Amino acid sequence: MDKHMNYGSDYKYIPATSIGSGLGIEVLPDLYSYTIQIVNIHLIGDPTTNEFVLVDAGMPNSAAEIISVVEERFGANSHPKAIILTHGHFDHVGAIIELVNRWNVPVYAHELELPFLTGKTSYPEPDSTVEGGMIAKISPMFPNEPVNLGNNVKPLPSDGSVPNLPEFKWIHTPGHSPGHVSFFREKDRALIVGDAFVTVKQEYLYKVITQEQEISGPPRYLTIDWQAAQESVNTLWKLKPTTAVTGHGLPMTGALLSESLTKLVENFDEIAKPDYGKYVN
């Protein structure tokens, strides 16, 4: 096990919390979503077994909370078979090093995301000028230097399979980040979206705090390629998901999900794409 892991020098606790923080939702019998401050982690697997994975790794300083959520659902000293990342932004890898050290499990991410997970490349600076509210304005305080997981992170298999999740396929959904992925299970049309679209307008502090539910594109202050982001939303819409869990906001299912996603596809420029910002056009 490679112990030479480190967070970026700008890694720090971010004091932002929604009313959903600390709440877990059993979306399906084997899909559990839990909110860490302003971001969601997901546990996939039957709670009566020890066969499960963790998708994403929360906010900085959240390892103890994530461990207790895992043990509450799967039993004392249980740990996932792997940690699978939708992408490597700070709020999705915030506890990753502590979790890898504690559980000694592999991490998987898309090949194009690996430079941001092996200390090689920083993400572009968050855009505080982008159209939006308070969260967009404070985004420059968010860490953007890469975490370095060394050889503990591996690329997702090129055939679209997901390690330890035989029923899921990964789908490349870039735009919000170059190697962003979502996960889809055909048999029940369950979709783990990541930040390709979200169910709260993440740029607005009062909407994040109250978790007011409305479909939106990826969080604006970190999204660098709006054309790719739009194509990714179209890709996910074509899957006709019946259940979706996202990186930010509440799960969405059934008619609300299909109507909202169709609305997002048809009105992407109005709903998702900011009117101004340094990564627009």
Image (cartoon, helix red, strand yellow):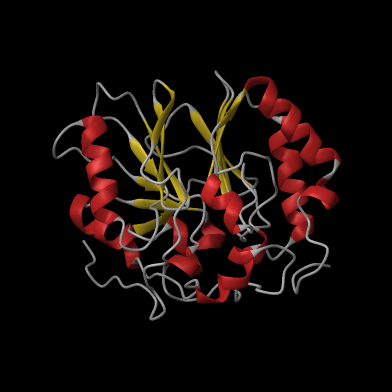
Residue drawn 45% across and 61% down? 16
Q: Residue 178 location in percent, x, y?
A: 62, 61
Instruction: Name the residue: 84% across, 67% down.
Output: 281
Give the quadrant of residue 246: top right
Residue 137: % across, % down: 62, 71
Q: Quadrant of the N terminus?
A: bottom left
Q: Nearer the viewer, residue 122 or 199?
A: 199
Total marks placed: 0
Q: Viewer-proximal residue, 212 or 120?
A: 212
Q: Residue at x 61, y 54 (%)?
A: 202
Would residue 215 be visible to someone looking at this image? yes
As drawn, which residue projects farthest toward the bottom?
9
Residue in the picture at 76% in, 51% down: 272
**Residue furthest to the left:** 76
Q: Is residue 240 among what the camera can see?
A: no
- The correct choice, above or below, for 182 with respect to 180 in the image is above
Residue 33 drawn at (x, y percent): 42, 36
Position of 165 compared to 265: left or right?
left
Residue 276 position (above or below residue 200): below
Left or right: residue 139 versus residue 214 is left
Examine the rendered structure and indicate whether residue 262 appears above or below residue 99.
above
Residue placed most toward the observer, 280 or 231: 280
x, y percentage for residue 59?
39, 58
Which of the 4 image quarters holds residue 146? bottom left
